[in-house]
Amino acid sequence: MQEGTLVLFTDRATQRLDLVRALDEVVPCHVRDAASVLPAGDCVGFVADIDLLQPAQLRGLRALIAEAPQLPRLFLMRSMGERSLSTARSLGASLCLPFDTAADTVAEAMRVHLTNPFPGMVRVPAPERGRPLVIARAADEAGAVLAGLLDSARQTGRVDSRLVDHGLDPILGAVGEAGLGAWLDTVRAYDDATYQHCLLVAGVAATFAIELGFSRRDREHLVRAALVHDVGKARIPLAILNKAGPLDADERATMSTHAALGHEILVEAGGFDASILSVVRHHHEMLDGSGYPDKLTGAAIPDIVRLITICDIYAALVERRPYRAPMPAPEALRILRGMEGKLDMALVRSFEHAVSKDVR
Ligand SMILES: [Fe+2]
Ligand SMILES: [Fe+2]
């Protein structure tokens, strides 16, 4: 038997007695849930058996990781969807197995991992080291909301408008407290391109809304619009969304269908008001009629759409992609200023004022 203790972090302890027994054969196992304390002393690793899309559980797991950031961690996944896996990777998962993996197999995997880390597994450093915990937690909560939104749109075609609202406070609170620069640094750690992009747009929109002096209700509304603006990407193949290089013409054509698809998804879902629906369908329209899908011009494009379009373009420029580094803020702002005729320049000037305060 190994020296030390192992923590099983689970929300279904009574159903996993078989797992506790099997792990106990390898290392003495302590069961922990979001409310209990870490056992004293010599923890050598842990198994996370929670729903990564549940913010409260994710908070508990993150607290555990913060206490022991260097330890190997095995995740039992309720979903092996791309976004759940992305969340697990961002939390430094050493290995991800389906939740219904046999207890003996999980225990054996842990035993091998403790003695000899899996060949080929990439250990991702614990992401919260060196970044403010408030931001990390907010990003996880908002990320879980976003993952739920995109996964359910992809898998069932349905989305719950009430779910989205759980992401608003964390984003507005984190950006208000720690600033946009810290938010951008944290969210860039997410390796799923859509996930990273939507969280960036939401953080940028929150900053813009705060700077413009919006009421609380209007701030929330703008962040809500930002979080869902690209929901149509749930119906775009992941091979295109996560392509490690620029898209070719056919791929761009496929990608550009996401605006109309997103509108369709939210109309079918119900519960989203007309301005949110307009943002989702029209955030790629340009004032000169050169955008898509409806080639709207000038006054036909509402203010909230103009605001999100600016946030969207800026976020796309400063995000981290596998094939390029984030563009520095001054260069991204210069590109926005160069889009006279396409973007609302009065809003671009306000935007520049808003984001220049605390981004590099
Ligand atoms: Fe988009
Ligand atoms: Fe976008």
Image (cartoon, rainbow, N blue to C red):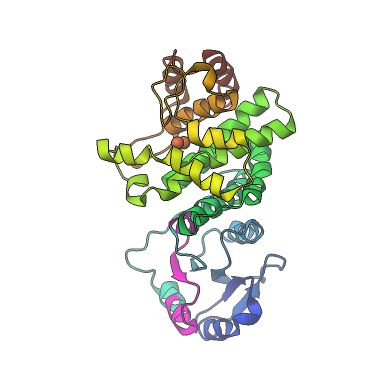
What percent of the width, then of the height, locates residue 130?
55, 45
Q: Is residue 188 left or right of residue 136?
A: left
Query: Of 115 and 15, which appears nearest the observer?
Result: 15
Q: Nearer the viewer, residue 241 or 229?
A: 229
Q: Residue at x 66, y 44 (%)?
A: 170
Residues in magenta, as a range: 82-109
Residue at point 46% right, 75% down? 110
Seen in the picture, residue 93 relative to 345 is either above or below; the reply is below
Q: Position of residue 169 (x, y in %)?
A: 69, 42
Does residue 265 appear in the picture of this structure?
yes
| Closest to the observer, 109 or 213 | 213
Please tell me whether residue 295 is drawn above or below residue 203 in the rendered image.
Answer: above
- Measured as percent of width and height from the top left, residue 249 is found at 26, 35
Ligand 1 quadrant assignment: top left
Name above or below for residue 322 compared with residue 209. below
The residue lying at 44 percent from left, 81 percent from top is: 105
